Amino acid sequence: MAKQLLGPFCQILTMEGLPFDGPLSNDQLDMVEGGGLLIEGDRIVEVMDQAHFQEASHSSGGQGFDVGFTPIKRHMVLLPGFVDAHTHMCYAGSRVEDYTRRLSGESYLQIADRGGGIMSTVRSTRQATEEELFRSLCKRACAHMFGGVTTCEVKSGYGLDIVTELKMLRAISMVNASVETFPWLVPTCLAAHVRPYDFKTDQQYLDFVLHKLLPQVKKEGLASRVDIYVDRGAFPPDVAEGFLFQARSLGFDLVLHADQFTTGGATVAARVSAVSADHLEKSTEREFRWLREKGVVAVVLPGSTLGLGEPFAPARRMLDAGMCLAIASDWNPGSAPHGDLLTQAALLGANQRLTMAETLAGITTRAARALRLDDRGVIGKGAMADLVGFECARFEEILYHQGCLRPSFVMRAGKRIKKALVSGG
């Protein structure tokens, strides 16, 4: 495999050696000044300090450099590629009407009760072809890549029937198989999003998902994670808990939409020892304690609170309670059409008084933990060569500009991403 030297950078923020749980100070960040990387294939072989990098670059005579990248002529700070641990990027249609109605005073739940909301997107997605879903997902994945996101979770959940749920998951798989210039997509089956109208009870529908859909998902290898939305207007905690235990028996990892509008979901997440509990806007210290004791990652979603005009999840209190906090975009057509992870993370950090270390960990190493990926979100030996660079002299400038400072360098699996390669997505 070809080797390449990459650098030098003003700063390399490795995100290595950080604790997964609790508060972080900026002093805990591992920083390499003026150094570079040795990459072989899709993996990082070595992180070099300034002296070692200069020696290596001189001895190689410049051979092995990514010749399309000349950071010597510019200030650049290098970070691990961002990880977005919760999105609904595979869908068809628009929910602009829902947004307009919210601005006129209707609530998210009121709109859903009157035929809008999730079921509106379900109708559009059922009508879309697999190819149409693939192409629209490519465009969103491309936008995410140029925002620095190199790994991204994507849920189904706008089908709520066998045909469309499989169609969505296959579209996600098609993006992964297409080219290496999109983020790596981690599929999650969210067929338990809401109950479709053609089922009389929640239990009847969840039994259908368990016995008819999930075995096919497992057979085709389309997802290894199962999600369920636990809240008013979705599924109640007692029914959700039984569903999750049965999904685990089929071999799936478990995640939950929890405590967005009412409490109860986080308790279920703790009882089933889920990988993550996502949303948590209404959670309290009691829920934080249970989740921490069970090692459940808290995934907060500032995009949906911005889209709905609601208060942010209490991220500061979660960290102070000793939790592992990840920050994700929740990119979806209804409550979170914004989609830009860095901007959302920066705004959440300002609102919740998060240190820059806490915010950056929330979209790198701690977000990778929410997806059970131990080779992402860090710059270190053996890690995937997923990297994002910003033209600035100090890492603090990235969040200071609150999303307006865009990445000028993105590498995914050892390959620099250029716009021309994905413009047709």
Image (spheres, rainbow, N blue to C red):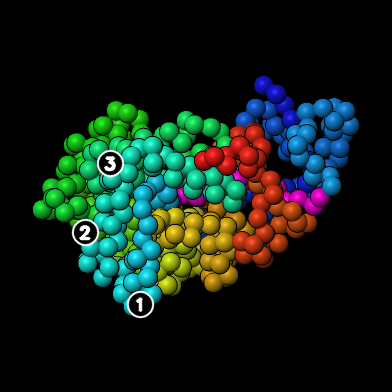
Residue kind at label 3, given as amino acid type: Thr
Give above or below for 115 relative to 66.
Answer: below
The residue pinned by badge 2 equals 236
Q: Residue furthest left?
A: 200
Name the residue at 34% across, 66% down.
98
Q: How many neighbours does mark 1 have within 10 angstroms: few (below 14), some (14-19), or many (20 or more)?
A: few
Marks 1 and 3, how far apart at CA: 32 Å
Residue 269 visible, this angle: no
Assess whether residue 138 is covered by the magenta stretch: no
The residue pinned by badge 3 equals 164
Task: Label 1: state its secondary structure.
Answer: loop
In magenta, the rendered stretch is 74-86
Task: Label 3: state its secondary structure.
Answer: helix
The residue pinned by badge 1 equals 104
Marks 3 and 2, how far apart at CA: 24 Å
Q: Mark 3 or 2 closer to N-term?
A: 3
Q: Where residue 398 appears, x then y in whole percent? A: 67, 59
Q: Residue furthest bottom?
A: 105
Q: Nearer the viewer, mark 1 or mark 2?
A: 1
Name the residue at 61% across, 37% down.
421
Is residue 373 left or right of 214 when viewed as pictured?
right
Marks 1 and 2, how far apart at CA: 29 Å
